[in-house]
Amino acid sequence: MKSDTNGISKINLYKIILWPVIILVMSFLFVFAIASHFHSIHSAEKLQHDLKQALFDAESSFADEVVLQEYPAIQMRINRIILDVQTRYEGANICISLQPEYAKSNLNKPITQCSDRAGIDDFLQSSNNFVRQIRVSGVNIAKVVYRSSLQVNIYSFFSPEVMFATFVAMFITFVAFYFLIKNIRKNIIMPFQETVEYNAKSVAFSELAGQVAHDIRSPAAAVLMLAKESVGLPEEQRLSLRDAANRIHNIANHLLSQYGGDSNDEIRAGKILIPPSVLSVFTEKKMQHKELPVSFLCNIAESASFAYVNINKTDFERMISNLISNAFEALIFNQGEVEVRLFIEPGVNNVVIQIIDNGRGMSQEFIDEFLNKDKVISQKQNGHGLGLTYTKSVLKESTGVLDVFSQINQGTTIELRFKAEEPPIWIATEINFRSDDIIIILDDDCSVHGAWDRRFQTILATHKNSKILHFNTAEECLVQIQSFSQSDKSRVLLLADYELINQDKNGLDVIELIDINRSFLVTSHYENMEVIKRAILCNAYVLPKILASDVKLILNEENSFDENKDFDLIIVDDAKEFSEVISYLFSSKDKKLRVYHNPYELLSSLLSCDKQIKICFDYDLECPVNGVELAEVLWRKGYNNLYLATGYQTQKMKLPAYLRVLNNKMDLLNL
């Protein structure tokens, strides 16, 4: 798991630097506002007091000057009062107006002065601070009207008001820092400590996992050899033993690739057949807990019998194994029911796997943590949450979707959804038969013969011209088929097991020797790439033995090969767009072209083809078999006009002499 120290550093920087700065700025703004408020009130009141005093002192002089009608003297006195007060109060705005009232006065207009000349109009239109009457012998001869305002620019931070505001701001800051530090400890320091401890455990676990993987590879190989040689065991038990040994071997290789660094096995995702993997793990878990009162159920819907998804097989089986183990461990007193369901989600073509138990359930808090976090803390008393964490990592790599439904003491449903993939071309999802078929079953297990009898029972009863023959050995089967006439050989439908215990030949050897057009290799080795390649080149489909009871049997009276023999050229190319273009160009030249998109289409049509027909192969056919390998099969059958047209660099390939290489695919038009 990746360390999240980088994420913690960002959070740390954010919470330790940004929030304190914001709090300090807000505190100082608070101090600033309080100080401004108190200081402006204090200064404005003092300004008014001093201005009133100055006017009171000059009142007698104003009276004389009004009586004597000395206009300039009045104006100078007003200006002197304004300048004198303004020098003591920087930023003060003062307006004074002397307005005559005595009727006999020759002072016929008000004398108005303002420190801000632009403020005269505002002064005349506004309500003023106060009006004072000038009296002479009891008669109002004039009135002095004035207004003052103060813009505070300088503050004293040692005033009582500012000191009080500062104390309040410091208290707010202290409380804020207390909660901030508490939050940092909870959300940063403690998770960081947990991360350090988790990483330390992960390193120790990595070392232990690498050592364990290295140590178990040898005994796993021994168990695998024993499984192959245990010919006395019934096939079902033998296959279970082999599957378990293979899974141990794969897990060991995967652990080494992740932690040990010395595994040469390539770990990659690919299409895997889901039902056998689920059944294999399910059977293993059922056998593991067979002595306990636990009901194990596995329900696979018919529509999901051949369900494929794109995922690494080892990862998938480990994930299912972990989830089934979790379901079992959730049971109260090891009693209850564990069920696995596999089906196709209607309408959206998704493969859905559900692991259901009726155990103690999970809290919603734990479900949210499981779904939303990378690291999961297990609810199990002795658990470490590794299974759930591993499940999330597998789903992330495979684009799978996870849902959890649970209620305390009622049980849990873990649901996995994957996009369904098309089965590979070599997998037989159906068997086409004709009403007069000779159905041949080759298998060394008697129970398999009985199972096929039951599958074909209705067909045999309905179609009297068909019959079924059973063989336990390859030699008996070969002798019988080789004794058939050519007409009877064309009626043969062969279902052959691959692994024939204590015999010189296996099922693929028989298919190669009889060279018939309808063969199925029924085997548990359906994922063995060497077996698959041989089966394709023999024109045989592969049927997983575990799904033999689910394969569809379809009546089809039509021949699978094309009766038209009159072709100028046959092309084998998986690119349908290219084949459409080349077909059009050939038709414009009045030439007949036949295009096949996979080896099965070509091999099924060979019975109707002249051995001198020109056949051109692409190298990459999007299957385990390439064009060169397919050309070799045809050459052995007597076809000589073989060509290779590919975008690959053929200079680096070791090609057989019978295969002629075209410079590019457009040279096909010249053939």
Image (spheres, helix red, strand yellow):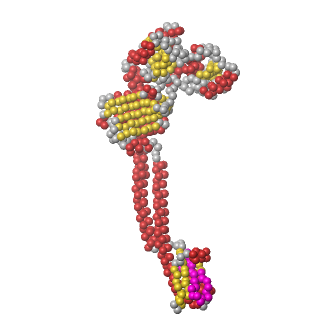
**What's drawn in magenta, residue-wise?**
85-112
Q: Position of residue 624 (x, y in %)?
A: 54, 25
Q: Position of residue 135 (x, y in %)?
A: 53, 88
Membership of 196 in magenta stretch: no
Quadrant in the picture for residue 182: bottom left
Is residue 249 visible to the viewer in this orientation of the structure? no
| Residue farthest to the front, as pictured | 103
Q: How many marks?
A: 0
User: Looking at the image, which residue is at 46% across and 21% down?
Assistant: 552
Q: Position of residue 134 (x, y in %)?
A: 53, 87
User: Looking at the image, which residue is at 46% across and 50% down?
Assistant: 8
Looking at the image, residue 661 lies above or below residue 33: above
Membership of 108 in magenta stretch: yes
User: Which one is nearer the viewer's eye here, 392 or 455?
Assistant: 455
Looking at the image, residue 237 lies above or below residue 329: above
| Residue farthest to the bottom, as pictured | 137
Quadrant in the picture for residue 250: top left
User: Which one is nearer the viewer's eye here, 302 or 474?
Assistant: 302
Is residue 91 visible to the viewer in this orientation of the structure? yes
- Looking at the rendered image, the quarter that the N terminus falls into is top left
Looking at the image, residue 147 lies above or below residue 205: below
Q: Position of residue 353 (x, y in %)?
A: 42, 33
User: Looking at the image, which residue is at 43% across and 42% down?
Assistant: 371
User: Looking at the image, which residue is at 65% across and 23% down?
Assistant: 583
- Looking at the rendered image, the quarter that the C terminus falls into is top right
